[in-house]
Image (cartoon, grey):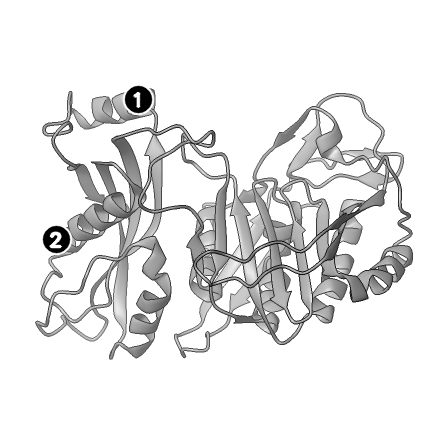
Amino acid sequence: MGGAALEAVWLADEGGRASTMARCTVDTTIVRHEVEGFKFPLGVYPVEEMKPKAGYTLDFEPADGGDESGDWEEWPDRYVFDAVLSAERVPGLVRLLLGMMPAKVYPILDILGHDAFREIDPYVSWELVGTDRIMEAIRQVPGFFYEDGLCGFGAMSEEPFLYFFVDEHKIVTIRAESVLREKIERMMSVFGLSQTEEAAGVDSAAHEHRSVLVTPKDDPISMSFDEIVEQLRDDWRLVLNVDPETNVDDDGKELGRTTWWCRVRVAVGEASGESEPGEKMPALSTGEITEAAAAEDEAEGEWATRYAEVVVTATCLREAEEMAAEAAEKLAGMEDSEAPPPFVVFADRMSEDQAAEYLGRSGKKKVKGAEEGGSVLSVKWVR
């Protein structure tokens, strides 16, 4: 791939929403790291001398309990393969794995995001999505999936039980029920991979991650990293897989009230004219993305879209998203319209230093009411 422009056409989804022409461009100035024929992804590379070793490790995991909510069944006895292979060979392995899966799967997406207290934003779908849609998205923007060092992706099926995930180092983890072991071992041999105790990828040494996507000024339809994530959240019905009622860091420490930086997508009026007055739509939280997508599909007319940046103080994700959605809706003057509800694209927490810098730029010195309840610090259009 090495920096060539990657063009993609986002097709209409099952709800019939209009197609969007888009392009994803990989930075041509990035030089790929290579050691003895082993190629590293453009977006993650070692910063010390190392000798990579292709191969796979194999472990066994016994069956465990299902999800307490009942959304997930118990995972069966399974074998776990961790495969390290040169970057140019990862796409072929993923194609074979997707080919083993049924027509509908649960997609997975991990993002090294902007949240000050969480390293990875884990997205999952709680409803089945067509495998062909996963394949099509990967085909459209392969640079995002296979080269960018800030994302990982995968999918899971229940019958047969098969899970794969390509992490941000582009190392492939496969979990498969016992009857699939021999088939996957044969698959590994096709790629010249042997079982080993010492497979070594880029995560075996000090390394750096980076995004490889650029949006040239002379190419206004080139998609940015965040725009692709937003598109995938819509198309794959992804939700942020964190507890929306708590506010903790990666170590489980309770953070209390923090400052949240939110991007909100708002329907500001029908393309053919202003919308008719209607009932006020409820604010959207992350857990309601599926219902919101359905509402957009069913809404009559085509709505123009704008994005608002909203900064709030809140004690949990749900509170932050509800406050941000309501503030953006008021900014658009759409509280009493029949427009689809606002969609919170992201809600990232800010550190005290980040919040202080933001407040300084905006001319605000302190947050009124921060101790008693949530506050909206700033609301503005960004595009």
The amino acid type, in three-letter code, at marker 2 is Lys
Q: Residues within 10 Å of mark 1 (few under 14, many from 20)?
A: few
Which residue position is annotated with label 1? 352
Residue 294 pos. (x, y %): 34, 73
Image coordinates of residue 154 in percent, x first then y, are 62, 56
- Residue 330's mark? 2
Residue at the image position 26 percent from the left and 57 percent from the top: 284
Residue 204: percent from left, percent from top? 75, 29
Task: Determine the secondary structure under disc 2.
Answer: helix
Q: Earlier in the sequence, mark 1 or mark 2?
A: 2
The Cα atoms of the two marked residues, 1 and 2, are separated by 27 Å
Pick the residue in front: 63 or 114: 63
Say whether residue 223 is visible.
no
Q: Position of residue 85 (x, y in %)?
A: 81, 46
| Placement of 318 over or under 38, stated as above or below | below
Q: Amino acid at mark 1?
A: Glu
Label 2 CA crowd tier, 10 Å (few <14, some 14–19, many 20+): few
Direction from residue 104 to residue 40 in the image, left or right: right
Residue 223 located left or right of residue 273: right
Residue depicted at x 34% and y 34%: 349
Tell me if residue 153 can be seen: yes
Relative vertical location of residue 312 with respect to residue 230 in this rendering, above or below: above
Q: Nearer the viewer, residue 29 or 268?
A: 268
Query: At x 41% / y 31%, what residue is drawn?
Result: 249
